[in-house]
Amino acid sequence: MSRLLLVLVVVLVIGFKNTSADDGRPPVTTPRATSGDTAVEPKWDERVTITVGNTEGDLIGSTEKVLQAAVDSVARLGGGTVKVLPGKYRLRNSVYLASKVRIVGSGAESVLIKEPSSKTKILVDSDWYDQEVTLDDAKNFRVGDGVVIRTKNPHNGGPTVLKRTLVARTGNRFKLDKALRENVWQAGEPTIATSFPLISGEFISDCVIENITLDGNREKNDHFDGNYSGCIFLQDCQRMTMRGVEARNNNGDGISWQICHDVVVENCHSHDNADLGLHPGSGSQRPLIRNNRIERCNIGIFFCWGVKYGLAEKNTIEGIRTASVSIGHRDTDNIVRDNVIKNSGVAGVLFRPERGPSFAGHRNRIERNEIINSGGDEGVGIDIQGGTEAIELVENRIVEQRGAAKRIGIRLGAETKNITLTDNRVEGLSHQVSDLRKQQAAK
């Protein structure tokens, strides 16, 4: 077993060890429901289930309001399932998850689609403690809408992005569900748009989203990037599972999670999104990404900042416009294995250069992947840039079917160190391995 695999196994064992202590206390073998004990819970055969449908079910409707009512009802009773019956549900705001809630649809027959977005200027200065905004053109905005406010920070010029809900109005003046906590002044050219994730979760845990179709209605919606949105967007969550989800046509990411730990994404289909197919975001620990299809996005799987101890395996990634797998800023100790990567626009697997060696993605293992037809005439199968160190490339097959041109199988950047190549096969490319370190040393 390699050192990287050993580290991963140890971390997983420590992270998921049983509540039985190593100090001699007996293990919990017959758990009971006890007030306040969230660590140990009996495995119940049945929990609360609420069905939602367009024409039948416990709750009937076709908007986010009926879905949210079901989520809130289940959450109030300590968790359970929201069963989304076949139908189309048109959303003007996110469906906000709660801990221990499972949303399960009927596959392609349960479709959540985002309504077209509207955008306008904000006309009146609002200070950080205010809880209202005044719109220039409010005719397409309604109470209950999810919105994003964008402006420039008046003090440093940086971008400010705020997600809120409109909860009351008089004319073109709207109250927000939460105070701004930022200065939204005319000097920053503020705007407001009805943009939001279709399903959103913040500071929650132990949820499942399963067997449902999410359509971002890309052609009719303003762009909203994956640091704030996606068909699914999670922020500061733990133990979240997405299984059998189709995330499509979003003017942003398919599925994005930021500072979320032990996220599982499996058997999902993320396709035709403007930005990232799957976005394990900054600080996310131990993501498990397997058996997914990711197609026709700008980047396939994007390891953001500080994503560690993750596993991406047995995914099919095809027709990506840039890099199918992108690894960079302090993304360390991850494994990418047994994936099929086809027709990448620039590179099959890219290690980003970052700001220097201390910021690079070290100690990652790329193993047994099949990488076919990467980039244009100067495309690269696996491209390791910057000061990246301690990368293992093991038994990958890199194939070019369109002609050699100037294409490269594996490229090692001039500043890279300790890159191990073991039993990789490169077929049909102009250069099997381009080692820029040797070229730099020869000068």
Image (cartoon, helix red, strand yellow):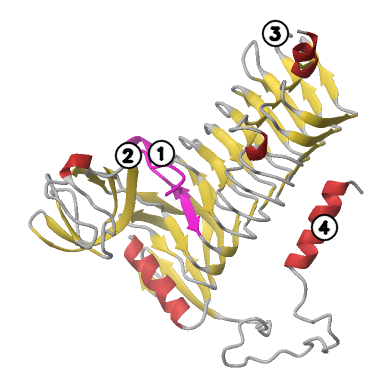
Look at the numbered discs 2 and 4 and tell me whether their residues touch, using CB distance below 8 Å.
no
For the residues labelled 4 and 3, the Cα–Cα distance comes to: 40 Å
| Residue 336 in the image: above or below residue 28 | above
Q: Amino acid at mark 4?
A: Val
Residue located beneath label 3 in the image:
406
Q: Quadrant of residue 440?
A: top right
| 217 on left or right of 287 | left
Residue located beneath label 2 in the image:
222
Q: Which residues are magenta?
A: 214-235
Mark 2 or 4: the one toward you: 4
Q: Quadrant of residue 159?
A: top left
Residue located beneath label 4 in the image:
9
Residue located beneath label 1 in the image:
251
Look at the numbered discs 1 and 2 and tell me whether their residues touch, using CB distance below 8 Å.
yes
Under circle 1, the secondary element is: loop
Label 4 Cα neighbours within 10 Å, binned few <14 / some 14-19 / many ≥20: few
Label 2 Cα neighbours within 10 Å, binned few <14 / some 14-19 / many ≥20: some
Mark 1 or 3: the one toward you: 3
Where residue 359 appears, x then y in whole percent? 63, 39
Under circle 2, the secondary element is: loop
Q: Quadrant of residue 361?
A: top right
For the residues labelled 2 and 3, the Cα–Cα distance comes to: 38 Å
